Amino acid sequence: MSKKIRTPKGMRLHIGIFGRRNVGKSTVLNALTNQNVSIVSNQAGTTTDPVEKPMELLPLGPVIFIDTAGIDDEGDLGELRIQKSMNAVKRTDIGIIVSDSGKIEKFEQRLITIFKEYKIPFFIIFNKSDLQEIFQETANYLENEKISYVKTGAKDGIGINLIKNEIIKTAPEDYLAGQPIAGDLVPPGETAILVVPIDKEAPKGRLILPQVQTIRDLLDSDTVVMVVKERELSHALDNLKRPPALVITDSQAFLKVAADTPDNIPITSFSILFARLKGDLATQVKGTFAIDTLENGDKILVAEACTHHPIGEDIGRVKIPRWITSYSGKDIIFDTVQGHDFPPNLKDYKLVIHCGACMFNKKAVLSRILECSLAGVPITNYGLIIAKSLGILKRVLKPFPAAYNIFEELDE
């Protein structure tokens, strides 16, 4: 039997379900998915850590529901659960607030404030509506604030289709429209060469996720795709009747690819493409210039979305620190975090360098960019910082006119 291939988490719409304990969050999730995903109990605080459930929700397609612990939990352990729930906000594309009181109280208001701060579209579910009608004062408030809501009885399956319809209405337009990785950079019928080094950290027998997703995106755009290792790039270029429209490389091979590729052929990297896809390329380009102001003893945070086991010449722990140290000539302190861990003390850092975030959704990356902005700390991306430290950032930004213009302004 063949293994079922799932859409990666980073490409799914993340729908977070939040609220106080025992308002029916888990019941709502189970009703939406038609499965007993989360444990349901009359005892408050049954859900501890966030529970994720991937599913297909037509016409949106692949989504992930996140069921969270109650934000009114108590005690030291309860505070840790609340923090886990608040962290889930940062990767939420659509927020759902569940209430069973028929009104907006301080806990719901706290969520509303946070969703607005992070610019997350959301709506409210008044669950157990057969037991408690919505207060008129609350209805007036929601109408004035233009906050949508639905009334449900999730335990009996009442109003579940209303929730699904509200999710569809609330979904961000860019998700519905879809975003290309590189397909908009190569005209149909033209060739893109993808340079894929095979090193110790490359998964045996397969390509890494950004490479696979980029290939699929280019094929969907009717591009001719050629995949080579860095040593074969010059031969591939010689064998083509006309130059490729774009060369995309792993950032670690930048120097050889730049040397082997004629100046008239645009080049960039998978990591930079994902900075555009998942984050804010303009902001991250600006962040690269922080390495021009580094001083001895400055701290840099390297953030990885995945939790791989580093071996050999790991890019985040070995290669990037080496390139930056060589470029700056300074004695820099590097810290590394993985997965959803992100320190609250961002002001301690002179710069944050993020991976391509293929395992994150766009909202999670934008939330981190926002946190850095609020802390006054520049943030950049693996591919961008490598290109900057190797002196080829200008060249690899040429496929992106807006980002290229920012570089030109800052590089004067």
Image (spheres, rainbow, N blue to C red):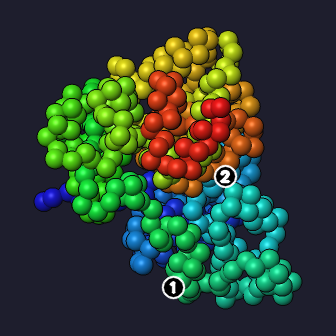
For the residue marked with disc 1, what is the amino acid? Asn
Which residue bears the numbered disc 2?
86
Residue 15: horizontal and vertical position, in percent? 54, 65
Residue 187 lies, with reference to residue 351, above or below; the image says below
Residue 396 lies, with reference to residue 281, above or below; the image says above
Which quarter of the picture shows residue 291?
top right
Q: Residues within 10 Å of mark 2 (few under 14, many from 20)?
A: some
Looking at the rendered structure, the secondary structure element under dot 1 is helix
Quadrant of the image containing the C terminus: top right
Residue nearest the viewer, comparing 342 with 299: 299
Residue 223: horizontal and vertical position, in percent? 26, 58
Using residue 372 as the reference point, say whether residue 221 is left or right of it: left
Which residue bears the numbered disc 1?
161
Using residue 155 as the reference point, say whether residue 358 is left or right of it: left
Mark number, residue 274: none
Q: Earlier in the sequence, mark 2 or mark 1?
A: 2
Q: Residues within 10 Å of mark 1 (few under 14, many from 20)?
A: few
Q: Residue at x 44, y 19 (%)?
A: 318
Which quarter of the picture shows residue 144?
bottom right
- Measure the C-alpha gap from mark 2 to mark 1: 27 Å
Q: Residue at x 51, y 85 (%)?
A: 161
Q: Is residue 266 visible?
A: yes
Residue 192 lies, with reference to residue 350, above or below; the image says below
Quadrant of the image containing the N terminus: bottom left
Looking at the rendered structure, the secondary structure element under dot 2 is helix
Q: Residue at x 75, y 87 (%)?
A: 133
Q: Is residue 364 visible?
A: no
- Asked if marks 2 and 1 touch (Cβ < 8 Å), the reply is no
Residue nearest the viewer, comparing 81 with 150: 150
